[in-house]
Structures are given as C-alpha cells and as structure tokens.
Amino acid sequence: MTDSKKGFSQDERKAVYRVLRERRDVRSGYLPRPLENTTLCRLLDAAHSAPSVGLMQPWRFIVVRDPAQRARVHEVFLHANEAAAVGYTDERGALYAQLKLEGLLEAPQHLCVVCDTASKQGHGLGRRSMPETSTYSVVCAIQNLWLAARAEGIGVGWVSILDPYAIKDLLRIPPGAELVAYLSIGYVEEFAERPDLERAGWEERASLASVLRSEYFDQPYLLEEARQ
Amino acid sequence: MTDSKKGFSQDERKAVYRVLRERRDVRSGYLPRPLENTTLCRLLDAAHSAPSVGLMQPWRFIVVRDPAQRARVHEVFLHANEAAAVGYTDERGALYAQLKLEGLLEAPQHLCVVCDTASKQGHGLGRRSMPETSTYSVVCAIQNLWLAARAEGIGVGWVSILDPYAIKDLLRIPPGAELVAYLSIGYVEEFAERPDLERAGWEERASLASVLRSEYFDQPYLLEEARQ
C-alpha cells in the first residue's frame, strides 16, 4: 500500500481543518523579510497542483518584487479606492474610510495571477458548455496557494480594489489573458482570529443554515434536524 | 497563547501539503453508502469558512439526493456530452469517447453550488472595480470543500459538461443567481495517484517553470537559478 492509498489519520484531518479555518486575508503586519525562493516555489507548486478543467492548467503566475513596480500598483489601488469610497455615505462611509484594505507597500512580494484563456492545453474539454471554468481553475489554484501559505506562516491578501486594465498595462499582460487576482504575500507575526471585516463591524458571519438548501434553491435545508 | 497563534508543526504542514497534492477529481468508484449528515455538514462548514470579497459569503449550496432528480441531471450531462463529442475527430475523438467524465448516477448525493450575485451582504466592498470576485469567492469555497472531502476519504467530481440553464431550471434557481459548479460527492475506496485525464493520455502535466513569470507576463522566471 503506497502512502497515497492510506487514509488520512485523525491528526492529519485535524491539520487540514485547521488550515481551512485559520486562513486569513492579510492586509497588514507584513514583515520586511522577503520569501526565500524555495519557500515561494513550494507555495507555487501547491497552486500548480490545483484541479483544472480538462487538465488545462491555465494559471500563470507573475512574481512582482521590484519596489518601483509595487509602488505603481499601490497607486492603482489608491485611485480605485477613492472612486469606491465615494459610493458610501454617512456611518458606512466613515467606516469604509477607516478600513485597511491592502498591504501592497509592506509586503515584499506580490503575485499577479492570470488566466491564459486562449491556451490550447486541455483541448477544450469541459469548456464547450461552461467556458468560465478555465477562470475557476485559476481560482482553485489561488486558494491552494493561500492555504499552503497559512501553514507556512505566510500571509496572503487578495486586492480586488484595482482597475484590472491598469494592472494588465503595468505588467504587459496581453489582451487574450485575463487578470484573475492580485495578491500581496509575505511573512507575518500572527494571524487574526477573525476576518478583518468582521472585527471592524463591516459585515457579520452568516450562519451555515442560511446558505444551505435541500433539493431546490427555494427549499431550506433543515440543518438542526440534519445534525441530529 | 491561543491555539490559533501557534505556528503549524512540521507534521501539520505535511498534512496540508498532502491534501493539496492528493486531491482528485473523482468520476468513478463512488460507493453507494450516502454521507452522514454530520459529515456532510463538516464539509459544508469548511466551504463556508472560505474567503469572500467584502465578507459577502455569496455561496449557496443545494444538496441533491433525490434519485429521480439525479437521473435528470445525468440526462442534461448526456445531452451536453453528445454535443461536445462532435467537436473531436479521429484519434482525439476516439479518446474522448472512452473517457469517463462524470459519476452522477453512482454518487449518492450531488451538490449544486450557486453564487447569489444580487446579495447585499458585504455592501459591495471590493466589487466596484472587479465584480467577478463574488463568483471567485464561491470557487474558493468549492476548493475548501474538495480538500476537506479528500481528507475524509470522500470523492468530489466537478461536472462542467452541462447546460447551466437546464440545471437552473431543474433546481428552480432564479435568474439573479449564477450556477458556478455542479458536483458529485461520495465515499470512495481509493483515490488515483494521478489525474484521470493524465492517465488516459488526454493532457500532460505542465512544468512549474512553464507557468511562472518574473515581473512581467512576457518575462520568464529563472526557476532553476531560483531553486538554488
């Protein structure tokens, strides 16, 4: 029996559930020490082992370390954030202004994650009916990287308050490729127990029951009964 | 020091990397024994702890157990698969015809995963510039569930050879909500060492170097140098 045929032990299962539970979106507290190349490659290998439609593996990872480039990306954020802030008024606007929504200058490296939608790999399998699954494969890779990073004590922050076309311009991403995510990555001292937006009072955690349905979208799942 | 402040031990890290590496897209070998409700809820809790833009938590999970409904979904697959098969000719067509691309009838339960794009949760944070991130949050939840399932000895298969509108119709999913994924779920005896499509010769694993770039999309990452 090879290792991969053995089931996960109780301890291994606990570790898996722990990383799923304790992963955080990190926007502050990055340490200046850059990631060693071997460490970064472990994270990228984890991403690269994600599922992909038709085994297309359409993810492309651009490692951005140049401080000048990181500062330019930060400018793109500032611009988009200003535009977004205008949309909130009164208390919600005051709360928005206080949020720390990115750690682009502090994190010693960024990762821009792109979907090479035009790639012939996978021979189109699974994408005739749902072409958007190529992008979804890339998101699976991002989540893999995020979890591996958490286990290594490395924070990852996903910054979506950006004009994707401005980023594509800066990073010379061709029109045929799609910007999926822009991440900041770096070592941190600690991880918050609860998500930043929850602690700041921006939004509450929904209950599991509120997102579950049985058989049909409009039919609730009787969770309490089910748990018995 | 609370548990969540402690770093991951060497063994915990190994377990995390193991689950990332050994997760498989399962299209066959499902056992008839249905998932206990408590087990299914653990998987759904794992999904529900995914990151989401603005803490929007837009995922909605429909558990489908009714055999008649599962058979209807299988019919939707057959229809889409027939249309897809026509697109391949010669050797590729012969290979496509041999692939087992779903386990919808064998798996005792399905999970339809939907994005409630219209939800006001999260107050639009992060979605002014990149509205597609609500869907990406749902994909992160799917990957979480997939990994938790692997650790529990439960197979998950993502079926994208489906007309999403036909599925929305069957499951009474309103126009405002988006079908993101349709999954089969069930216990399995074992997991394949390599992805089905790789073993069948449909597509090869790409090297990590081929998907990495440095600073710009068109600039290679010198991986061998970096690994030293």
Image: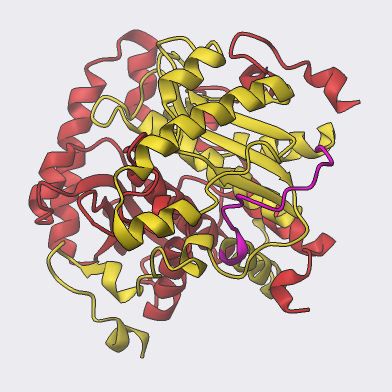
Chain colours: A yellow, B red
**Quadrant in which residue B221 is drawn:** top right
Tell me which residue sits at (40%, 71%) in the image: B40
- Locate the C terminus of chain B and report the quarter of the image it occupies: top right
Q: Residue furthest right?
A: B228
Residue B12 occupies which quadrant of the picture?
Answer: bottom right
- Residue found at x 39% / y 12%: B91
Report the number of numbered marks: 0
Above or below: residue A2 compared with residue A183: below
- The residue nearer to you, when weighing A163 against A141, is A163
Q: Is residue A32 magenta?
A: yes
Tell me the quarter of the image containing the N terminus of chain B.
bottom right
Which residue is painted at 68% across and 56% down in the image?
Answer: B16
Q: Nearer the viewer, residue A139 or A101?
A: A101
The residue sitting at the bottom extreme is A228
x and y, in percent, of residue B132 in the image = 33, 37
In the image, taking residue A118 as reference, residue B209 lies left or right, namely right
Q: Is residue B156 above or below residue A59?
A: below
Please, what is the dominant secondary structure of the magenta stretch? Answer: loop
Which percent across, then down, holds residue A180?
45, 31
Query: What residue do we see at 40% from left, 49% from top?
Result: B137
Q: Is residue A95 left or right of residue A183?
A: left
Q: Which residues are magenta?
A: A21-35
- Give the side of residue B184 with respect to residue B65, left or right: right
Residue A91, percent across and down?
A: 34, 62
Q: Is residue B156 left or right of residue A226?
A: right
Q: Position of residue B75 (x, y in %)?
A: 15, 44
Res. B117 visible in picture: yes
Q: Is residue B197 visible?
A: no
